Image (cartoon, rainbow, N blue to C red):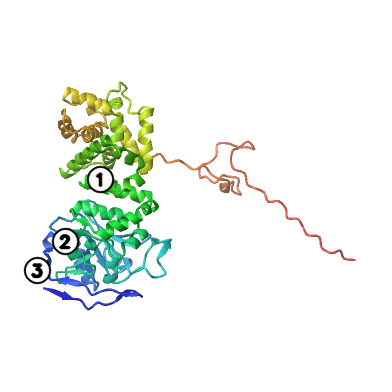
Amino acid sequence: MEQKSTNSKSEDPSSEIPQPRILERGDHGVSRNKIDRDALRALYRLIDEGHVAYLVGGAVRDLMIGKTPKDFDIATDATPRKVKRIFRNCRLIGRRFRLAHLHYRDGKILEVATFRSSGEADEVVRDGEMIHRDNVFGTPGEDSHRRDLTINGLFYDVSNFTVIDYVGGVKDLRDGVVRMIGDPDRSFHEDPVRMLRAIRHSGRTGFQLSGETVAAMERCRGQILKANPARLLEEFYKDLGSGHARNYFQTLQQLGYLDLLMPVVGDWMEESQGLVPWLEALDRLDGLVAAGQRVHQAMGITALIAPELLSHLDTLIHRKSSSTHLPKSVREGISRVLRQLKVYRRDEDRLRKGLGSLALAHRCTEEGRWSREAENSPWARDSIEILFILLGPGDGRAELLEQARSFPEAELPPPRVRRRRPGRSQGARPDGSGSSSTPSTTEGPSSDRPKKRRRRPRRRSSGPSEG
């Protein structure tokens, strides 16, 4: 049975938030038995403290379509400071919008966010139409209209076992549609990454993008270049490790985003010879993730730039040198695409080391076993994983990869920290010693210690003479 809420608070000065659709316990299929125990305890703790608290976002979506949620996010009317006072395991993060993270064993983190307002207040900072800071608290209705997709705008209330829908997400879930909340053009201008998120959820759920969403994405496609490159890379890493990389990146290519974000990769796709191996490599990456294997994000990049790597494969696997340093032609070709992706240096270094060991891994596949040299190499596991992604399981690669799972995972040394030389402002003290606590070993006028600057005497102004 469904009922209407009496909440009629306006979303902004010019429009009112419609009353939500509320699904009773027997109408939505969400069960507390499928909700993380720590998330349930956090929800009940907030409610016991007198606050409104809901399970929100992707968790509600996945529970309603019968999937196991990856994350359990919570939204509440408690401010971040109040959440921190309630939970001893809480840390506050974020600059654009403050969030509370609840930390548990084994690295588990629950995210608790305060309901956001419509964003019309003075505290919202805009650069053109892009929002850069948004720390305005609001009501559940306002918060639901600030989310990106209707299927992500649902709330689950554990206090009465109801699903609360302000945005039409229940209908879109049942119809299999991915739709933006509100005006999609404005939404994409405020945050261009929402276009990628719409594509992601379409690929993961198998839902169709709504007509108005696709039309707005075509009009706003160029806005994606305004997104922060580091944030784009993190979005790509999420999708490379999601198990749905092929669907996601193929849709990016079909809608023209690949040409904008990765022109080199887009050029490969114009040739049928580049498209097929690229999709096959992404398929193999998805297969590893689906099998429960932990794939490092540097190996995910291998699938994304597979055509470029395949063009250098003969050179790499037939090298005679045992060094992991790559030939200049290979380095230049790979660097060209990695610069476009803005790949982190640590991931680029790990990928280079794995590629530099491909000849050793290839010899082991020909022999049908790991050699002692390979077993002692920190990069053997990465190199056979690269060969598997690029060429598939044949020629004994699947068996060697399975054996390599027991090898220690490669680790790069921590980056060197440069010590800053003392500047002029760190000059000699009045007692003649330098600014460092370490005594100088040089004495006399020839010392290299920074010298104290002397002020020039101020010129006295000449006044009128007295007669």
Q: Earlier in the sequence, mark 1 or mark 2?
A: 2
| Residue hosting label 2 | 175
Quarter-of-image position of residue 175 = bottom left
- Label 2 element class: helix
Q: As rendered, which of 289 and 40 lies closer to the eye?
A: 289
Q: Amino acid at mark 2?
A: Asp
| Mark 1 vs mark 2, CA separation in Å | 23 Å
Foreground mark, 3 or 1, reads: 1
Above or below, comparing residue 63 to residue 283 in the picture: below
Tally the numbered discs.
Answer: 3
| Residue hosting label 1 | 250
Q: Amino acid at mark 3?
A: Gly
Quarter-of-image position of residue 93 = bottom left
Q: Which residue is drawn at the image coordinates 28% and 73% (left, top)?
A: 17
Q: Residues within 10 Å of mark 3 (few under 14, many from 20)?
A: few
Q: Is residue 38 visible?
A: no
Q: Quadrant of the N terminus?
A: bottom left
